[in-house]
Image: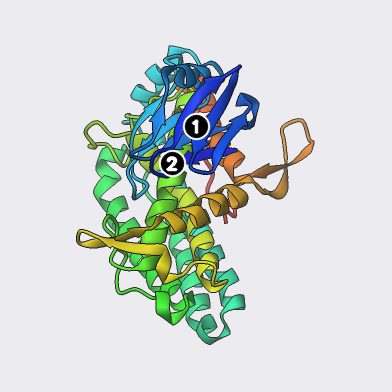
């Protein structure tokens, strides 16, 4: 369970080894074994005893703005593994192997975007032709990444950012056609959002960001050492790299909330120069995210030959663990990062 506390005046305390949540409706006790993460917005209170209980059970605590943007966190000072991983990560980050890994992330993102547009074409017959055409184009663009030269990311960064940016605009233009007309938008707008759909998308991306950053730290990786997003002062650049291939999960959820009419324009409110989710909007988005990311996807074979079905949350964690295992066991012996393969259908769609 992801415990999200965002109502004015709520408090979280420790009581007899459990978390006690108090709000205007009363008090509720939660066992630490039930909780995967805790998120608190402004105007909420948490005691140091509750923080210590969360740290004891390796439960991350995130502090967020009302718009869902993370601003701080509490977690144990212990890393998930030995320092060898982070030392190798720093060495690896400027090599052709790191550039290959980043191209694989973009490849997986484009393949997942293509798969999502293909699925939406079946749901939205009026836009099916355009959605299918865009799906095919994104898949073709993904295939070109394998033929890029094996060179350090410093020589590819600008080209890769431009490549990703052009295809991102193509993708959102197509995704826009799958939305009900009342939710269509002119351009992708971040914080602040210019329309209700982008307000929803921004909040859901914030939740995904929390999941990825925590997975990075627990895997023993250094979050500030990124590959493509390298020059972000005091920001976890690796989280921005890893989140790229996972964004289509959130895109699909946001579109389905709009198509199903569960998300309404009244779930946003104007603040400053943009739109943000209202309290009712957050009450819709948070459990929807937890439900979709907790459901198992298709089965895949483990190294032992067993077939296991992983949830989206677990797949996000496994991406971090796989990178950490490569840096610990295969680097620098595998100097080209041959573990990171192109040509496979992404499993994140």
- Give the x, y percent position of residue 327: 48, 24
Farthest residue toward the bottom? Answer: 126
Q: Secondary structure at mark 1?
A: helix
Relative to 181, is 65 above or below? above
- Give the x, y percent position of residue 222: 38, 25
| Mark seen at residue 118 | none
Between discs 2 and 1, the one toward the N terminus: 1
Kindly report the distance in space between the C-alpha atoms of the residues bearing marks 2 and 1.
10 Å
Mark 2 is surrounded, within 10 Å at the Cα level, by few (under 14), some (14 to 19) or many (20 or more) other residues, namely: many
Q: Which residue is mark 1?
A: 215
Foreground: 38 or 333? 38
Q: Nearer the viewer, mark 2 or mark 1?
A: 1
Point 31% across, 31% down: residue: 94
Point 59% across, 69% down: residue: 119
Q: Are marks 2 and 1 in contact (CB under 8 Å)?
A: yes
Farthest residue toward the right? Answer: 306
| Mark seen at residue 242 | 2
């Amino acid at each position: 369970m992801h415990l999200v506390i965002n109502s004015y005046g709520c408090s979280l305390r420790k009581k007899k080894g459990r978390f006690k949540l108090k709000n205007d409706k009363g008090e509720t006790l939660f066992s630490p074994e039930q909780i995967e993460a805790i998120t608190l917005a402004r105007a909420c209170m948490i005691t140091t005893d509750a923080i210590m209980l969360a740290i004891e059970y390796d439960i991350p605590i995130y502090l967020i703005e009302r718009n869902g943007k993370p601003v701080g966190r509490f977690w144990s000072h212990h890393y998930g593994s030995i320092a060898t991983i982070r030392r190798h990560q720093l060495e690896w980050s400027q090599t052709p192997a790191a550039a290959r890994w980043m191209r694989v992330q973009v490849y997986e993102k484009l393949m997942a975007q293509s798969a999502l547009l293909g699925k939406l074409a079946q749901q939205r017959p009026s836009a099916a032709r355009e959605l299918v055409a865009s799906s095919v184009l994104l898949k073709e663009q993904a295939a070109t990444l394998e033929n890029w030269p094996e060179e350090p990311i410093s020589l590819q960064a600008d080209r890769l950012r431009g490549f990703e940016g052009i295809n991102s605009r193509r993708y959102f233009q197509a995704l826009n056609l799958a939305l009900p007309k009342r939710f269509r938008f002119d351009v992708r707008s971040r914080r602040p959002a210019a329309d209700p759909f982008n307000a929803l998308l921004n909040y859901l991306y914030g939740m995904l960001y929390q999941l990825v950053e925590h997975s990075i730290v627990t895997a023993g990786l250094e979050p500030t050492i990124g590959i493509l997003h390298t020059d972000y002062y005091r920001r976890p650049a690796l989280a921005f790299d890893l989140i790229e291939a996972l964004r289509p999960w959130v895109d699909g959820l946001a579109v389905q909330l709009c198509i199903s009419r569960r998300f309404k324009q009244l779930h946003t409110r104007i603040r400053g120069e943009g739109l943000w989710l209202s309290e009712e909007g957050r009450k819709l988005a948070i459990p929807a995210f937890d439900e979709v990311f907790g459901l198992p996807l298709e089965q895949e074979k483990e190294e032992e030959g067993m077939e296991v079905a992983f949830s989206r949350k677990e797949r996000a964690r496994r991406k971090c663990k796989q990178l950490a295992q490569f840096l610990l066991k295969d680097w620098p012996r595998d100097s080209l990062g041959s573990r990171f393969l192109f040509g496979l259908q992404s499993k994140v769609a």
